[in-house]
Every structure is written in C-alpha cells, then in structure tokens.
Amino acid sequence: MGQRGYRAHMASAHEVVAAYWAAAEARDWDGFGALLAGDVVYHGPQTREQVRGRDAYLRFNAEGFAYDWHIAVRRIVGEGRHAASWVEFTGPDGPQPGLCFFELGEDGRIARITDFWPEPYELPVSRAHLVERY
C-alpha cells in the first residue's frame, strides 16, 4: 500500500492505527509512510523528542532502532479522528508497554502522534496486601 495506494476513505481511526502498527511490525516503510500526513508531528514526552514531517518520521522509525524489535497490539480504541493504542514493544531489554495517542488530519492520514513508554517499577510495600500480582 504505497503512498499512491492509500485510500482516504479508510474511514475509521481504528483501522488507520491498526494499519500503522501492522506496517511498522512488517517494516513496510512505504505502507507506513502512506498512513502519515506530510506534516505529521511525533511527540515523545518522556524523552522530550519531537520529529516533524513524514520523511523525518520515517527515518526515525526505520533507522532509529539498531536492534531487532517487535510490536504486538493489545488494544486500539478510536472515535472520529482520534485513536489510542496499547502495544507491547519487545526489544533487547524484553517487553515494554507503550501507549500511543493519534490524531488524524482531514484527509484521514495520521497528523499527530504522542507516545508514552512507561517503565515498570516494583510494587510499593504499602499496597502489596491490596492487590493480586500477575
């Protein structure tokens, strides 16, 4: 699904985000890029990273991770031009949950991405008796 093959009527934000993660996992950078607005903006609040523009964001993803990685989608929810996803990223340090928020532009392409990658931490002793560990 190259950029020319993108269908603007790929209506739901859920479908666009599912295609985004599928293309990323497949390393289908043409298909991935077809889902992005030309002026897409990526924000990573924890590392204060910002990437502007389709070409820069494609390079960020294709070249920015010099190791084998995989994405498994746990859940996507979407309404109108907004969607959120919960994914599990697996890299050299093992699995890590990721929460990603998307905003689609008028043409149905992804215009804005905000990505959160929370680090796991140990259960505080003060709540240990109140929860079930998994």
Image (cartoon, rainbow, N blue to C red):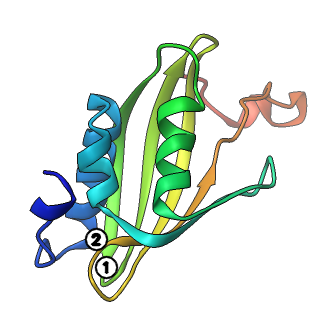
Occupied quadrant, residue 48: bottom right
Between 14 and 2, the one lying in front of the other is 2
- Height in image: 72 above or below 30? above
Q: Is residue 132 left or right of residue 62?
A: right
Q: In this view, does 79 lie above or below 45?
A: below
Q: In this view, does 26 lie to the left or right of 92?
A: left
Instruction: Say which quarter of the image contains residue 122.
Output: top right
Residue denoted by label 2: 13
Residue occupying the point 17% across, 52% down: 2
Which element type, helix, strand or loop, lies under badge 2?
helix
Residue drawn at point x = 23 percent, y = 51 percent: 19
- Say whether residue 22 is left or right of residue 41: left
Q: Tell me where residue 46 appears, x and y as whole percent.
A: 79, 50
The Cα–Cα distance between marks 2 and 1, rounded to whole angstroms, is 7 Å
Q: Is mark 1 on a helix, strand or loop?
A: strand
Q: Which residue is drawn at 21% across and 59% down?
A: 3
Between marks 2 and 1 in the image, the one whose residue lies nearer the viewer:
2
Task: Tell me residue 126's x, y (percent).
Answer: 89, 35
**Residue at figure coordinates x 31%, y 49% from the top left:** 32
Compared across the picture, whether 124 is left or right of 7 comes to right
Quadrant housing the C terminus: top right
First in sequence: mark 2 or mark 1? 2
Residue 93 image position (x, y, % from top left): 64, 12
At label 1, which amino acid type do we have? Glu
Q: Residue 79 carries which label?
A: 1
Q: Residues within 10 Å of mark 1 (few under 14, many from 20)?
A: few
* Residue 39 position in % (x across, y down): 50, 73
